[in-house]
Amino acid sequence: MRFVAHLDADCYYVSADRVRYPDLIGKPVGVVGNQGACVIAKSYELKAQGVKTGEPVWDVLKKCPETIFVKRDFRWYEVLSRRMLAMVRERSEAAEFYSIDEFFFSTDADKQIARGIQNDILNNIGLPVTIGVARSRTLAKLFSDTAKPLGIRVVTDPDEEREHLAKLPVGEVSGIGHRRAAKLLLHGIRTCLDYANAERRLIRGLLTKTGEDLWWELRGQPVTPIRPDRPTHKFLSRGGSIGGASADPNVIRAWLVRNSERLVEELEHYDLKAGTLSLSLSDQYGGGDSINAPLPGHTNRYGPIIAALLRSFERCWQPGTVITHMHLVAGDLKRPGFVQRTLFDPPDDETEPLAVVKRDVNERHGRFAVRGGTTLFIPEMYRDRSHGYEICDVRGKFCF
Ligand SMILES: [Mg+2]
């Protein structure tokens, strides 16, 4: 019988930085976010001093003055993530990319196999990981979450499973947050075992189908299979902060171009064409508008996409309006073979060979080596190489 394994890298961002900077090993390390003010990941040494993710650096320094801060580098984290996934895929016929540092894969209930994968990743890539093996995904994730760091927990015997579940608070289950745990407590459900032993109908009534799925999974009945192919996207979006507040049309257009280039790259990566496109501009108070940017047909080409966005921008933006954030959202996504061609499809114009050259050069010399001239208005974005990659560019990770 095949079981489900959940592999999760231990304090991933810090561990990834330690791969290229071994001097950081054993020291308190905090990875700081975009603006450099908050810690987005921390080493176990820093955690031991009471530092929490999201804390500002000045508070961190009060708790641990020796902290070494490192700037996040999502491109590097993705490079190592791919290496890990490739290693897992060599050893399992079905492996699912769940997040940048978490994979599910099918395996045997054999501690030695899990240990082998763990050692291979540690010795060849330099990353510590924890692996849980169980009868379902929810159980596997639960066991690996509670076996960190560098842990291996293989639990496939139902009696042993119950022993573990009795010791774990129900809030440890991924998908059951504080609010749901509080609801369950009113019915005397405190541990994972209480949950698994509860009446199915009670769980369904309290937490709907999602809760019932978890209930089955905690009882060792897999509901969600391993999905080696990612589910198809409904939307792809790119955007975020424009690096401060601006009412300068040149700066806003420059960001429109930068984000369009990132969106096109994403459409090409998944081999999808967009049927709808929208642009939203907002200010620091969250106010703002989302407007449609009609496309002439399904496309993933830069020319029609930027033309549609610029038209909408010129039509809707009131001169003098300050914006801080921009998002582009591509919807009605279709694979190229599934797009109905119409009489009104734009012809493959002369910009196409240009796009090919741009892609080739950028693959060789850096992601934005060749880019739209409009982006000359935001030179600071390209001066610092760490801006070449943003959190949204990490595939499989939600934007935040
Ligand atoms: Mg992790």
Image: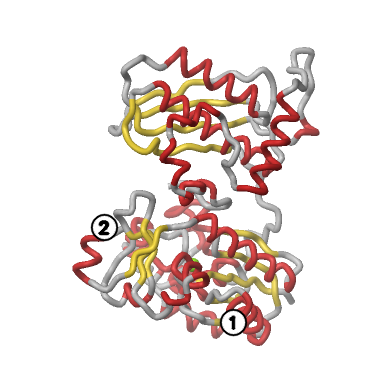
At horizontal 40% and vertical 73% (from top left) the residue drawn is 191
Instruction: Tell me: residue 386, above or below residue 61.
Output: above
- Horizontal and vertical percent position of residue 134: 60, 75
Q: Is mark 2 within 8 Å of ligand 1?
A: no
Q: Amino acid at mark 1?
A: Val
Q: Left or right: 142 with respect to 82?
A: left
Residue assigned mark 2: 56
Q: How is the image coloured?
A: secondary structure
Q: Which mark is residue 154?
A: 1
Q: Amino acid at mark 2?
A: Pro
Secondary structure at badge 1 equals: strand
Where is residue 79? Give x, y as percent. 60, 60
- Estimate the spatial distance between the alpha carbons at disc 1 and disc 2, rounded to whole Å: 38 Å
Give coordinates of residue 362: x percent, y percent.
64, 43
Name the one closer to the observer, 265 or 167. 265
Q: Residue at x 57, y 58 (%)?
A: 78
Horizontal relation, residue 100 to residue 351: left or right = left
Number of numbered tags placed on the structure image? 2
196 to 123, vertically: above or below: above
Q: Is disc 2 surrounded by few (<14), some (14 to 19) or many (20+) residues within 10 Å?
A: some
